[in-house]
Amino acid sequence: MSEWRLTVGMEIHVELETKTKMFCGCANDPFHSDANTNVCPVCYGLPGALPLINKEAVAMVIRFGRAIKADIAPKTFWARKNYFYPDLPKGYQISQSTLPLVDGGQITIDGETYHLNHAHLEEDAGKLSHSADKTHSLVDYNRAGVPLLEIVTEPDFHTAEAAKKFCQELQRIFRTLKISSADMEKGQMRCEANISVSKTDVLGTKVEVKNIGSFRMVEKAILYEYDRQIEALEGGEKLRQETRGWDDVKGKTVVMRTKETSADYRYFPEPDLPMVATSLDAVETTHILPDEQRAKLAELGLHKEVIGAVVDKNGFALVMELAGKDKDMAIEAGKLFLAIPKFAELDQENQEALLNLRKQNGWPKDTVAEIVEKAVTEGKSIEKIAPEFAQNEDLSGVVKDVINKNQKQVEEYKAGKEVVFQYLVGQVMAATKGRANIQQVRDELKKALGNTNS
Ligand SMILES: [Zn+2]
């Protein structure tokens, strides 16, 4: 008997970080605003309110499409997808799903290529919060109308891990292209998996799993469905095409509803939005995708873990720029992205300044971590903070100063009162705010006191 083969296609929604919403001038800022403050008659779909297409959102989608070598539709087309739900004030969602802006495309991860069916723009719905005692629900429409990119892949995944890695790679691509932070915890990126099993080349009955809230859950939900479907089929059961939700507490999928067909949504052209020609000229396409970044970093001889950290923390530009001038420093920069998480929070100018000063001062990793922490929490530049840490280098000035200011104690020491030496060490330490190496202080002091003897 042949083995059951898993087949998965992914659907990924990502909120685009435009300044304003998809069809009106309301701020696109659902995470930092009081509930229902970024709303207007267009968001609510009030009679007479007319939508306008957000050019920035369309440009972001074209940027994504070109980066993954997809075809871009020559014109935009919008349709109404009708359904009733409390988080959808208009009673319909404006979507491009019948004629997507991005057709095809592919993403390569470490030599494996996965294909997209299409990607299209639509608008997000509002957000419902249900009270713990289940007596009431609240709705916030700040998110209603936020531009949403939906990406639909071909059924190219045959392991749960491959599907998870693909979602992680997409997040890196969104961040590289600066179209979204794609934070799954905030719901900026949401994954759904279409899962089937089969023993032949004909795909089995597809089950859609929603409510997958993290990359870890992508993998767990697919593995669970794989086992559940095989068990059902081997027990003589017939699978239904249905939508299930991942329950992370119970560690299982549960039935949500049997699958709607597109006829249920009564799609029809959006009468208030014209067809608009798309232009590729104004869209920047110079971004280097994560897979190419990894290949270039590997050529530098960086360790695989270091490469992962550099790509994830947006450090590629810095490392490559340094590589052209000072290869060792480029490698050091890569290591800092892995060893010191907050290093990525500095801007490139400060990252470079830190690397240069480290080379001059010979700071150990702990000192670098301390400087980074201080720069990030106090919002100061590396140049401003560095002098406090540079004192280890030249203690002679401080030592001389302490000797001059404590002539009485110096005389006592020279007269044989050894205990005074500790006092002088303490004075030097205080003058360096405790940052000096104590052994170095003792050595410098002995040297200086010896000199005054002679
Ligand atoms: Zn609005």
Image: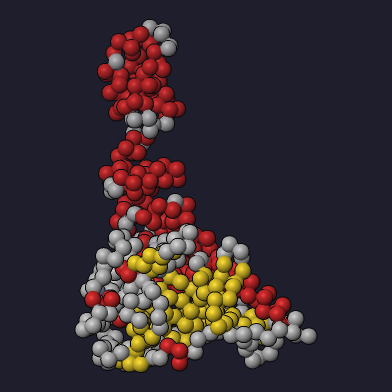
Q: Residue furthest front?
A: 135
In the foreground, 238 or 367:
238
Total labels: the figure holds 0
Q: Nearer the viewer, residue 244 or 450?
A: 244
| Residue 248 percent location from the top left of the image | 57, 64
* Viewer-side residue, 365 vs 99: 99
- Percent coordinates x, y for residue 45 in the rendering: 27, 80
284 in relation to 331, above or below = below
Q: Which residue is located at x 45 percent, y 45 percent?
A: 365
- The relative height of residue 426 versus residue 369 in the rendered view (above or below) is above
Q: Quadrant of ligand 1?
A: bottom left
Q: Residue furthest top?
A: 415
Percent from the top left, x then y, of residue 211?
Answer: 51, 71
Q: Can see residue 297?
A: yes
Q: Quadrant of the N terminus?
A: bottom right
Residue 29 lies left or right of residue 329; in this view the side is: left
Q: Residue pushed farthest right?
A: 1
Q: Residue at x 36, y 55 (%)?
A: 345
Instruction: Describe residue 120's horizontal placement relative to residue 301 as left or right.
Output: left
Q: Residue at x 40, y 16 (%)?
A: 421
Q: Quadrant of the C terminus?
A: top left
Please give the name of the residue rendered at 44% of the width and 60% of the height, measured from the top-left corner: 131
Relative to 50, 377 lies left or right:
right
User: How far across and how far down the image is residue 354, in percent?
Assistant: 35, 50
Q: Nearer the viewer, residue 103 or 91?
A: 91
Question: Residue 422 is drawn in which quadrant?
Answer: top left
Look at the image and tell me whether residue 301 can be seen: no
- Quadrant of res 437: top left
- Residue 219 picture quarter: bottom right
Q: How is the image coloured?
A: secondary structure
